Amino acid sequence: MANIGYIQVVRHCNHFCGFCSNPTTPYTHDLASMRVLVDDLVRRGYFGVILTGGEPTLHPALPDIAAYAAGRGLHVRVITNGHRLADPAFARELATAGVSLVHVSIYSVRPEVEARLRGMEGTLPRALAALDAAHGAGLRLNVNCVINRLNADHLDEGIRYFLRHHPYVRHFVWNNLDPSMGRAEVNQAEFTPRLGDFELSLHRALRLLHKSGRTFRVEKVPLCYMTDFAWASTETRKIVKGEERIVCFLDDKQTVRQTAWGHRYAPGCEVCSLRPICGGLFDRGDGYDPGELAPVFVDPEAIVQAILEDGDDPSDGPIRTLAQWKARRDPPPAGAEEHDPPRRPEPEPGLVPVGRVTEAGRRLYEAKRRAEARKAERAGVRQERPAADDEPSPG
């Protein structure tokens, strides 16, 4: 992973996912405001930046900010639903601008499931066309998938499809649903899975990829649900290597610097051999049951060694050897206490603002809220709560 920052370029989208955790806000960016955030990541010595949203390809300055970040020496990535990327000319424009890697989000290869998750028809063929267009433009590709209640039983089905029809995709990322923010918070009953719902299909998917020689990462899944592939956990890798992450939210949260990767643990976790390297249960929204967690007893050092010896994964963290990791895990001195890290990362004080709220931005937000209310009614999902009432005055 290395230290990679995230910049939310926009917070609106041309899809209407019922589990969106970062929906539209009144905040907007321009090229100048995004350049300042890129400069901050460079000053911190970050390896790269991920341009995300909302749907970042909707911002007209996306190629310009990508070019600026690449010119400052950052590895530039874009997370997209693929709708605009399906245009080969646009894919070439991103490649020319300096984008090195695109993450295309595809949640299910069953068209009816993908349409339900996206809130509109015809999204799957468009996303698959985006893979071909990006590959044709010379862009490296990842496929991202949010694990949710509707796709939990067939994650491996997608892998079989991609291996057969898009064999040039070499890396896959699963991100278990965050039930704590936005539309996901008010639609937990429909979209938040049980951990047991996806355990088998995720394991089958990871086994297929491992056998094929491809790479993968899994986020927000406790290690007791992926013991055979614990080295692929994003949180575990960051815990082991001592890495951090900056997220520049285009909302009231602003810039958040995350240095702690633990979340919720059950009482039985205290005896689990993997507790020191496990992120636990990502459950800020009380959408999961800690009772599904159970201790496991495998050698953590073998997992740590596999992470530290992964030559394909650049690291900016302070931990580079097993001996360094073991020294860091020495028991605290007498009288010291260990505390779990805060469940919510706090905004870092004194940082540059992330976008701003203008009168035009507020009007755009209100128009999108009205349009999305109609989409929510048609899709049979609840619309997220409005943006905070204490937002800054337009300026």
Image (cartoon, grey):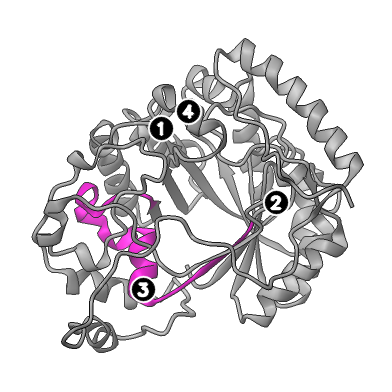
Distance between mark 2 and mark 3 Cα atoms? 34 Å
- Residue at 80%, 67% in the rendered image: 35
Q: Where 359 falls versus 338 (above or below)?
A: above
Helix, strand, or loop for circle 4?
loop
On screen, residue 248 versus residue 231, left or right, reads right
Write the start and end of the magenta stretch as one range: 219-248
Q: Nearer the N terminus, badge 3 or badge 4? A: 4
Distance between mark 3 and mark 4 Cα atoms? 30 Å
Given the image, on which type of amino acid does mark 2 rest? Answer: Leu
- The residue pinned by badge 2 equals 250
- The residue pinned by badge 3 equals 310
Q: Which of marks 2 and 3 is in front?
A: 2
On screen, residue 167 versus residue 91, left or right, reads left
Q: Can residue 150 be spotted in the picture?
A: no
Q: Nearer the N terminus, badge 1 or badge 2? A: 1
Q: Which label is found at residue 276?
A: none
Q: Which label is found at residue 148?
A: 1
On screen, residue 360 versus residue 285, left or right, reads right
